[in-house]
Amino acid sequence: MKEIVAHVFFNGKYAVKSISIEDKRIIFEDTDKKPDFIVLSGFVNAHTHIGDSFIENVPRISVMDLVGPGGFKQKMLENASKSTIIKGMKKSLKIMEKENLRAFFDFREGGIEGLKLIKSLKFDKTMPMILARPGKNILDYDEIEYLLNNSAGIGMSSISDYDYKFLTEISKITKEKGKLFAIHASEREREDIDKILNLNPDFLVHMHKAEDYDLEKVREKNVPIVICPRSGLFFNIKMDISRFLKKGISIALGTDNAMISIPSIRIEMLFASLLFDVDPVEILKTSTITMDRFLSRAESLMIFKNSPYEFIKNPYIRPVKILNIKNTIIEL
């Protein structure tokens, strides 16, 4: 393949590079030429709940009443058959695979049974980063052991939903196992950022109600924040990605509950571009490289002949070439 100049999103970094490909070697070099391609290692959906994919006719009620403990979603999950839940998840997985999604981070409700449901699916092209959740608010060490041995870690709702000692112990066990710990934060109301960060989260979700002090603390700890624009629109929550970026925080993009928004990261990028006045390159970062720190090296590179602006505005654009780089030497 001839040399190209591209916006490159790879291995946790963004840069404009000239790229030459020779057999099993890909060489990236600095350049001052104008890029007319985009090269990336696949998309990442940083926050999903695909277990609720089967739910239709979602009522317009508050965040707490819809997705909080004992709310609408929990009741629907408890009353649904396993086959119904699995069928819905398969539908969501097909959407993600069609978009060349490299990985997705799924917050898995339902304890051990909920974990078993998603692990019953077959994942060929898209890697699930399953973040399990205890099925009850009473510490069960056997349950936590099982969840951590069969997932990428733990994904909790907010500190407002639990006894703080309960969360502290779960976080401690999770970190001892070398697994990920993530939590929703300041979604419905501002929460104590010091208590949140004392749980040593790998990333936070939402932070809608965060104040400047909270964001500065998050930046100091270098903790990414996942935002979900379509979910925010559903709940009429105002957010602004530029506010986070100006604080130097790494932002990732997620689609949240599948019952509200299908897990299309391409559509989420489009919405982000319409809602937030930021450089399209920043939006591409949110769906490609922000979560690289938690993933193994990608096995493919996708090449698009578009500008970042064109690419984000059109979710139907597909790569002109996909390179298998599993056994390729990458020279950055």
Image (cartoon, rainbow, N blue to C red):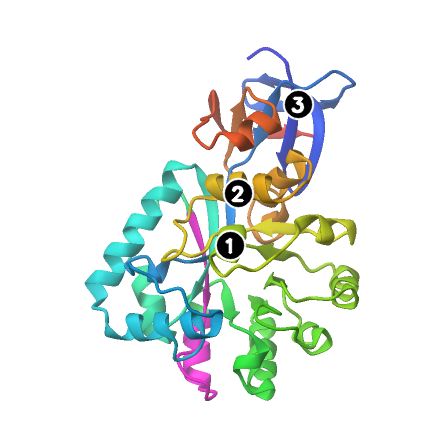
Tell me which residue sits at (36%, 58%) in the image.
259
Asked whether residue 125 appears in the rendered view, the answer is: no
Q: Which residue is mark 1?
A: 233
Q: Name the quadrant of the C terminus.
A: top right
User: Do labels 3 and 1 touch, CB within 8 Å?
Assistant: no
- The circle on residue 271 is 2
Q: Residue at x 68, y 40 (%)?
A: 278
* Image spot of residue 274 (x, y percent): 57, 40
The residue drawn where x is 23% and y is 69% is: 80
Residue 237 location, quadrant = bottom right
Distance between the alpha carbons at the discs numbered 2 and 1: 10 Å
User: Residue flagged by tag 2: what amino acid is it?
Assistant: Phe
Q: Are marks 2 and 1 in contact (CB under 8 Å)?
A: yes
Q: Height in image: 2 above or below 328? A: above
Look at label 1 and name its amino acid. Answer: Leu
Residue range of the region highlighted in magenta in the rendering? 127-148
| Residue at image mark 3 | 27
Q: In the rendering, at what x and y percent does residue 264 appear?
A: 43, 44
Q: Secondary structure at mark 2?
A: helix
Q: Is residue 250 left or right of residue 54?
A: right
Q: Give the CA separation, mark 3 to mark 2.
A: 34 Å
Residue 278 appears anywhere in the view: yes
Q: Which of labels 3 and 2 is toward the front?
A: 2
Q: Is residue 10 magenta?
A: no
Estimate how packed mark 2 is, as few (under 14), some (14 to 19) or many (20 or more) residues with alpha carbons within 10 Å. Answer: some
Is 130 magenta? The answer is: yes
- Judged from this view, the residue extending furthest toward the top is 2
What kind of residue is marked 3? Answer: Ile
278 and 254: which is toward the camera: 278
**Residue count near mark 1 (Cα–Cα under 10 Å), binned few <14, some 14–19, many ≥20:** few
